[in-house]
Image (cartoon, rainbow, N blue to C red):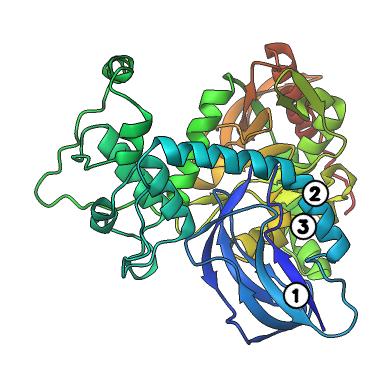
Amino acid sequence: MSKFELKLPQMGESVAEATLTAWLKEVGDTIEMDEAVFEIATDKVDSEVPSEVEGVLVEKRFNVDDVIKVGEVVAVIQVEGDVADTSGGDEAQEAVEETVAEPVQQLEKQMTQVQESVAVAPDFSSSERFYSPLVKNIAKEEGVSMDELEAIVGTGKEGRVTKNDIMAYLESRSNGGVQAKAAPVQEAAKPAQPAAPVQKQEAEKPKPAPMQVGAGDEIIPLTRMGKLIAHHMIESVSTSAHVQSFVEVDVTNVVNWRNKVKNAFEAREGEKLTFTPIFMEAVAMALKKYPMMNISLDGDRVIKKKNINLGMAAALPDGNLIVPVIKNADQLNLVGMAKTVNDLANRARNNQLKPDEIREGTYTVTNVGTFGSVFGTPIINQPQVGILALGAIRKMPSVIETDKGEFIGIRSKMFLSHSYDHRVVNGALGGMFVKAVADYLEAWDVNREI
């Protein structure tokens, strides 16, 4: 018998933690290979985490609503045979202990100094109410008393106080919305002298006016994912210098070609041929032509990505968005692109995406035309530097140039809206890239075989 440690997998370059939303197995349950053990949620995806081995669940390290760091052990599974023990042997343990001995000693010294200089932190063990370790740590660090913690309304399962609940309480308290009670840790560690600069800083920060709720108005709390997406969007706008370029594209050849081949394609491949894989192919080709759009900015370093991994923004039934990633999109033919697009879109709508399928994107495409929008100005999906919005395809009167002169005719047209990070992408590159996408679509071969 040996034990296997099931860890929280990496779920994206900008994702460092996830919230445990549900346990799908209990201690003592038998687990099959690739069977889901628990569910997690991030600002990008709600996903099930499967087991990498077959065995029996013997330990759960976290509770529902706990926030888990990537790489932390979430569950321990007992397996038969000689499966590698991921917990490590005695030698590995000794090596780890030696490695962390000095930092631990320093931490213990600091803790001793803090305990000697401040009042004893509140003890929440006497409460009959359940609090996760994360919530307890935040409460102790912020000087939240037992009475304050007991008074917080929990939005978690069975009324549990979540990280968002206590952070919202602390924000309200700092803004004067809640009368703060005794906080001995802060008072002992922070004498009254530094209070003046803090008050000055708070006075300079504008406070939003309280929202008036009228009779009959309905209050709808943001969902957990909604809060995370809102935070992610604000961070992106605060990080990147967003600018846009717009191009109108004549996609008449694309529309006519698709109408001609879509029935035969579905009969042969068992898949619908939408416009999305065609547009994805065009974007992948443009990224090959302009590889400096396939980059990320890391401090003062530009990281030029080797692979072209296209994110495909997809709307969920609850109104939220998710971005599955088409890996190595430039290496797929149109049949492979269509199958990948359809598969990711279907599983995204059914909440069946795996964590690996929403990470490592290098550029994102969003189809605002699905909802009838002519064009849009999308927000960059960090840490990428560009995102392309596809507008609705519309039949419009247009001037047609021929060898025999100019004529007015009906053409199918759409707008491409390119948002890019002006810190590293200048207007020339941003404009040439989106023009390359347009040129590829306008030069579509109506006799192309598929």
Find numbered disc 1 in the image and state the secondary structure of the residue it sits on. Answer: loop
Q: Position of residue 407 (x, y in %)?
A: 67, 23
Instruction: Identify the residue shown where x is 88% and y is 84%.
Output: 81
Question: Looking at the rendering, in which quadrant would you find the N terminus?
Answer: bottom right
Q: Position of residue 378 (x, y in %)?
A: 55, 32
Q: Can the viewer see residue 331?
A: yes
Residue type, numbered disc 1: Asp
Find numbered disc 2 in the image and state the secondary structure of the residue it sits on. Answer: helix
Residue type, numbered disc 2: Glu
Q: Which numbered circle lies on residue 295?
A: none
Q: Residues within 10 Å of mark 2 (few under 14, many from 20)?
A: few
Q: Position of residue 303 (x, y in %)?
A: 80, 27
Residue 200 drawn above or below residue 339: above
How many numbered circles are shown? 3
Q: Position of residue 450 (x, y in %)?
A: 88, 54
Instruction: Identify the residue shown where x is 49% and y is 66%.
Output: 64
Residue 130 quadrant: bottom left
Q: Image check: 202 left or right of 134?
A: left
Find numbered disc 3 in the image and state the secondary structure of the residue it sits on. Answer: helix
Q: Residues within 10 Å of mark 3 (few under 14, many from 20)?
A: some
Q: Earlier in the sequence, mark 1 or mark 2?
A: 1
Residue identifier under label 3: 340
- In 3D space, how far apart are the residues under numbered discs 1 and 2 (Cα atoms)? 35 Å
Residue type, numbered disc 3: Thr
Nearer to us: label 2 or label 3? 2
Residue 185 drawn above or below residue 56: above
Q: Which numbered circle lies on residue 98?
A: 2
Q: Residues within 10 Å of mark 1 (few under 14, many from 20)?
A: few
Residue identifier under label 1: 34
